[in-house]
Amino acid sequence: MSLVEVRGLTKIYHTGTVDVHALRGLDFDITEGELVAVMGRSGSGKTTLLNILGCVERPTAGRYLLAGEDVGRLSDAQRSTLRLRRIGFVFQAYNLLPGMSARDNVLLPTVYSGLPNAERLAREALDRVGLAGREHHRPAQLSGGEQQRVAIARALINSPSLILADEPTGNLDTQRGQDVLALFQELNRDGITIVLVTHEEQVAEHARRIIRMLDGRMASDWQVAQPLDARAVLAQMLAESEDQP
């Protein structure tokens, strides 16, 4: 079953006397349970696409259906509700509030959703990403990889059907990046659909499907025969580091 359906998706930004065509008539579906990487150089339209899929921006033309619901027909308030109910976001810069604990950062989306049993769910989300016992640490007391795990726990607290991740390993070293990719693969195996924007080929190769964008259009779309297993890659990296004098 398709979770995401995009037909003729177009986005034009009007900047003074110049029209910038960020997206030019995209057509694709994303099935429930897929792990999809979206690649493209700067200006290809991948971030604009992510913003539209996340109900942050509206397309200029075309249709976007999320779980069969036509997002374009929704009011701003309805789109906000849909975003809170169905979508989790993970960003390159983590976007954690520095003065708040890991648990309180994870709880932030529930301020608007009114989720019952929110504190218990926050603890469970932190446990799910491997941060049990770290819930009272502030971002400055956590490594970059741990901060990204807090951000992923925050994305999980409302039990989304779709996670949108924008360059989630961009601020991490290779080892911590592999650790985060392994977590995404585990969440995907649990049934969560994930769309991962990246400019790194090796990151994209962890996905089951790679969409490449160029100048606002889909340049290619193919299934990966054998995605990289992040846990296996990480284990090999650790073994090699132990063998070095």
Image (tube, rainbow, N blue to C red):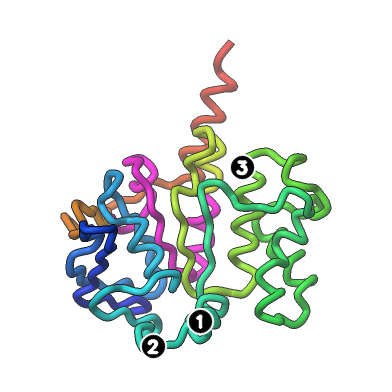
Give left or right: position of 31 versus 108: left
Q: Which residue is mark 1?
A: 82
Q: Residue at x 69, y 74 (%)?
A: 110
Q: Residue at x 43, y 73 (%)?
A: 55
Mark identifier at residue 138: none
At label 3, the amino acid type is Gly
> Would you say residue 103 is visible in this rendering?
yes
Marks 3 and 1, the one that precedes in the sequence: 1
Q: Which residue is mark 3?
A: 145
Callout 3 secondary element: helix
Q: Residue at x 52, y 68 (%)?
A: 190
Q: Is 107 placed above or below 7 here?
A: above
Callout 1 secondary element: helix
At label 1, the amino acid type is Leu
Observer-nearest residue: 180 or 73?
73
Observer-nearest residue: 33 or 109?
109
Q: Are marks 1 and 2 in contact (CB under 8 Å)?
A: yes
Crowding at mark 1 (Cα within 10 Å: few <14, some 14-19, many 20+): some
Observer-nearest residue: 213 or 227?
213
Marks 2 and 3, the one that precedes in the sequence: 2
Q: Residue 164: percent from the left, percent from the top? A: 46, 62
Which residues fall within the magenta stretch?
181-210
Mark identifier at residue 69: 2
